Image: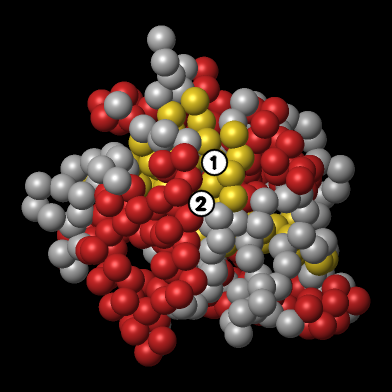
Amino acid sequence: MIKKRILIVCSSDRSLVRFRGDFIQDLIKSNYEVFTAAPNLSKPIVEKLRAFGATPLSYELQRAGISPLGDLRSIRQLKNLITENNIDLVFPYTIKPVIYSSMAANKLNVPVISLITGLGFTFTGISQKARFLQKISEFLYKKSIRKNRWVVFQNRDDLKLFENVKILTQDQKTYVVDGSGINLDRFPHRVNEKKTDNIIFVFVARLIREKGIHHFINAAEKLKQEFPNAEFHILGAPDKTPSAIKLERLIDLNEKKVVKYHGIQNDVTHFLQESDVFVLPTYYREGIPRSILEALSIGMPIITTDSPGCRETVVNNENGKIIRPNDLEDLVKSMRFFLEKPKTIKKMGIHSRSYAENRFDVKIINKKLIDLIKQEI
């Protein structure tokens, strides 16, 4: 029997391995032939994708900003990839790949299941620039995804927004999954006792203002005065964006022992295993943050905001704390709770692991997505 061919399209080659590696392998186990398309493919990623059994392809994409000529080039190249490889279904995720892949596939009458993985800065409405970009994105989404077989969301807030601004048609088929899922075996529940009595808070994210890095640092500065043995660890790297924190500030804070800055890490498992509480005070429109899923699987209490994509990961006071977005005092209060009541950390961590097992297991998420694909090809 001839295998059906699926093309997964994204904007970052690393995400194919980190966020979609299990999905790619599960598709192949389900007897699909998988192709992946990303810009600027690196040799290590190509080797990993081939080891999975997938066929890596490349296309040009200007990830930031709007460039009509560049955008048309991306659409044309995606059309060529779909045609040359006899693709039966296109599965794009993140904003530009969803829009351009949908346009390309719709012109060729190839079915599309698009995944909305979060709306990011563009749909925050926190600045004039964001509101301008949102209007453009709404227009492009309307032009591109209305013929898609399914539009899949990672949280109900994003689905509701798409409905409210009439991006979706009334008869559009939509579905909600709980994020990208997490491989529970790769992020095992910690069982070993800690090596130190110090309470360790950890922040793992892109180091931009909207992710809450400044709030985390300000909270650390406040709490260090009251709890000098508390530790505040930061993993990640500053973006090349105006809202990115300066590397010099991180180095200075590290030298002053306010925080411990570790830079970007390919594998965060060890850091999560050795930490106590995961903190992500973001006011960015997330899908469901992968970093939180990893912390849930490890068995950590979570402090995060009452924001789209984040509120789904915490049952307040059961496996962590939900705080108001952009509210430093609420963050400090929640972090102080764990410093004053350290015995709650283990109990809440057990609830986090249970929540990951019952709701966010990657096997559950992938089965739902593959069931949708089976309906269409």
Bin the neighbour count of mark 1 within 10 Å (Cα to Cα): few under 14, some 14-19, many 20 and up.
many
* Residue 202 located left or right of residue 243: right
| Total count of labels | 2
Q: Please give the name of the residue rendered at 63% of the width and 65% of the height, measured from the top-left corner.
A: 206
Of all residues, the one furthest to the bottom in this rendering is 128
Q: Position of residue 276 (x, y in %)?
A: 70, 49
Q: Which label sits on residue 10?
A: 2
* Residue 374 located left or right of residue 297: left
Tag 2 secondary structure: loop
Q: Please give the name of the residue rendered at 33% of the width and 48% of the height, measured from the top-left corner.
A: 105
Compared with residue 70, is residue 23 higher up or lower down, i.e. above or below? Answer: above
Q: Position of residue 153 (x, y in %)?
A: 33, 49
Q: Is residue 104 something one can see in this rendering?
A: yes
Of all residues, the one furthest to the top in this rendering is 1
Q: Is residue 314 something one can see in this rendering?
A: no
In three-dimensional space, the C-alpha distance between marks 2 and 1, rounded to whole angstroms, equals 8 Å
Q: Which label sits on residue 36?
A: 1
Q: Amino acid at mark 2?
A: Cys
Task: Find residue 279 and report its image quarter.
Answer: bottom right
Q: Amino acid at mark 1?
A: Thr
68 or 299, which lies in front? 68
Q: Please give the name of the residue rendered at 85% of the width and 73% of the height, measured from the top-left corner.
A: 254
Give the position of the N terminus as an image quadrant.
Answer: top left
Q: Position of residue 269 (x, y in %)?
A: 73, 42
* Residue 299 located left or right of residue 313: right
Q: Which label sits on residue 66?
A: none
Compared with residue 193, is residue 144 higher up or lower down, i.e. above or below? Answer: below
Bin the neighbour count of mark 2 within 10 Å (Cα to Cα): few under 14, some 14-19, many 20 and up.
many
65 or 18, which lies in front? 65
Q: Position of residue 244 (x, y in %)?
A: 64, 79
Compared with residue 327, is residue 46 higher up or lower down, i.e. above or below? Answer: above
Cβ–Cβ below 8 Å for labels 2 and 1? Answer: yes
